[in-house]
Amino acid sequence: MNASTQMTKSLEDYIETVYLIILDGRVAQVRDIARALGVKMPSVVKAIRELMRLELAVHEPYGGVDLTAKGRRVAKSILGRHTLLREFLMKLGVSEKMADRDACLMEHVVSAETLGRIRDFTENLKSERKGAL
């Protein structure tokens, strides 16, 4: 069983948030993670401990949170699901704000098979549009 299948929706949100902060070129501080997720700092500390137990994150006391190579792979996968679902929903005409919110909920429960079909569908749409130009 890989780390992403052992993770709860909540832990996936934490690792994705840490990854987004890092991608933004910032140090992922506990207070910034808490602010981004709208939770209290002790909740972040507890989640980070669990990510460390799963060997997905490292955190020095009073320092920033970083992801291990394994953690970055997991976070990249979660973010990829989110991005794919958001883009798909927006192609259906859902507003960007609602598509982002719904993608965040869906990314945790959609099967790999469904994601694969959505990926194929959106790639076919892109190919059809290029062919029409």
Image (tube, rainbow, N blue to C red):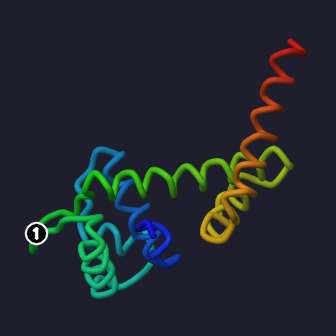
Q: Residue under label 1, please give it.
A: 60
Dot 1 falls on a residue whose secondary structure is: loop
Vertical arrangement, residue 25 with respect to residue 62, above or below: above
Q: To which quarter of the image does residue 49 belong?
A: bottom left
Residue 18 relative to residue 96: left or right: left
- Outermost residue, front direction? 1
Q: Residue at x 31, y 51 (%)?
A: 22
Q: Name the quarter where the N terminus is drawn.
A: bottom left
Closer-to-camera residue (69/90): 69
Residue 67 relative to residue 105: left or right: left
Q: Residues within 10 Å of mark 1 (few under 14, many from 20)?
A: few
Percent of width and height locating residue 101: 66, 65
- Given the image, on which type of amino acid does mark 1 rest? Glu
Percent of width and height locating residue 26: 26, 50
Residue 80 relative to residue 43: left or right: right
Q: Residue at x 60, y 55 (%)?
A: 82
Residue 102 relative to residue 129: left or right: left
Percent of width and height locating residue 3: 41, 68
Q: Residue at x 35, y 61 (%)?
A: 18
